[in-house]
Image (tube, rainbow, N blue to C red):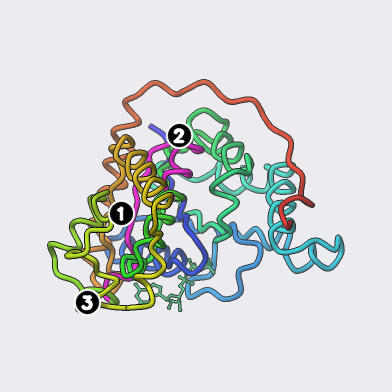
Amino acid sequence: MSKFGVLVMGPAGAGKTTFSNSVIQHLQNTRRSCFYVNLDPAAETFSYEPDLDIRELITLEDVMEELGLGPNGGLIYCFEFLLQNLDFLSEALDPLSEEYLIIFDMPGQIELYTHVPLLPSLVQFLSRQGPLNINLCAAYLLESTFIIDKAKFFAGTLSAMSAMLMLEMPHVNILSKMDQVREMVTRRELRRFANVDVQLLQGDEEDDLAANANPMAKDALMSGGSFKQLNRAVAQLIDDFSMVSFLQLDVQDEDSVAAVLSHIDDAIQYHEAQEPREPKDEQEVNYEDADM
Ligand SMILES: Nc1nc2c(ncn2[C@@H]2O[C@H](COP(=O)(O)OP(=O)(O)OP(=O)(O)O)[C@@H](O)[C@H]2O)c(=O)[nH]1
């Protein structure tokens, strides 16, 4: 047996901290132990004070001020620094017993989940392949309001896929802030986004939510000959990657939080039964490039 952990990821403002807080509340209500780790060096305020906070090690503000880096380069520097000071994590996480769920609240900069190889190194250290031996699952949040603008929704879907491919770990995708869209779309329409229906990307006028809800957003969907081809290629890519689906999360509803947690548990249990994979080689990172 080993400890359990969830990496709460997703773009800025997707609702990561709010979701983390509702998980903590749910675990408290059900008398389960949890340990809350903030890994966002630019975080400002919390409803639940983190049990471990990267800002005790390094803050984005200090890095930007002292090294003259921008926010993206600064964040990458902070993560590189964390990777050079992994005792900061192991001293706090190693002593925890197996009953703990460890919640890692991640930053929102999208670079971290796409092309910069820092998260895979961190995951490797935390996971069953590394010394901390935590059974980890990624929870990738995307705002449900993105479905009103299909271009935005599919861009978000691609970034979720990118995180899935880069991290190669148990992963659940979540549409957050469901309270904001329930009145705007039918259940049938919602299902087409939750179980990503690539026909949505092919310009099906009848089902064009954007046209109904927000005329400006319709223009944002790529159109014209070459864009049609690109849309088709993206649709094919998502279709081939047949695992892309989203759970629906409403943080006001404890059952919804419990259902998402139960999926996370299932994803972890499923992967726990699999053989751990071989570690990847480490790669170099250039902070300056990140702000270009
Ligand atoms: N209506 C509604 N608002 C939400 C929900 N979840 C989060 N919000 C709001 O969305 C905003 C961003 O939420 P956060 O939880 O801070 O999002 P985050 O992903 O942690 O943000 P960053 O750390 O900046 O990347 C806040 O104003 C929240 O109150 C939700 O389920 N419903």
The residue range painted magenta reads 160-179
On the image, the x and y values in percent for residue 41 come to 66, 62
Ligand 1 visible in quadrant: bottom left
The amino acid sitting under disc 2 is Glu
Q: Which circle, 3 or 2, is nearer the viewer? A: 3
Is residue 143 or residue 153 the one in the foreground?
153
On the image, the x and y values in percent for residue 23 come to 36, 62
Q: Earlier in the sequence, mark 3 or mark 1?
A: 3
Q: Secondary structure at mark 2?
A: loop
Cβ of mark 3 under 8 A from ligand 1: no
Q: Which circle, 1 or 2, is nearer the viewer? A: 1
Residue at (20, 56) in percent of width and height:
192
Q: Residues within 10 Å of mark 2 (few under 14, many from 20)?
A: few
Task: Residue 71: name its quadrant.
Answer: bottom right
The amino acid sitting under disc 1 is Leu
The amino acid sitting under disc 3 is Met
Question: In what quadrant of the picture does the N terminus appear?
Answer: top left
Is residue 98 or residue 105 the one in the foreground?
105
| Label number found at residue 184 | 3
Q: Secondary structure at mark 3?
A: loop
Residue located beneath label 2 in the image: 168
Residue 120, compared with residue 48, is above or below; it is above
Alpha-carbon span between mark 3 and mark 1:
19 Å
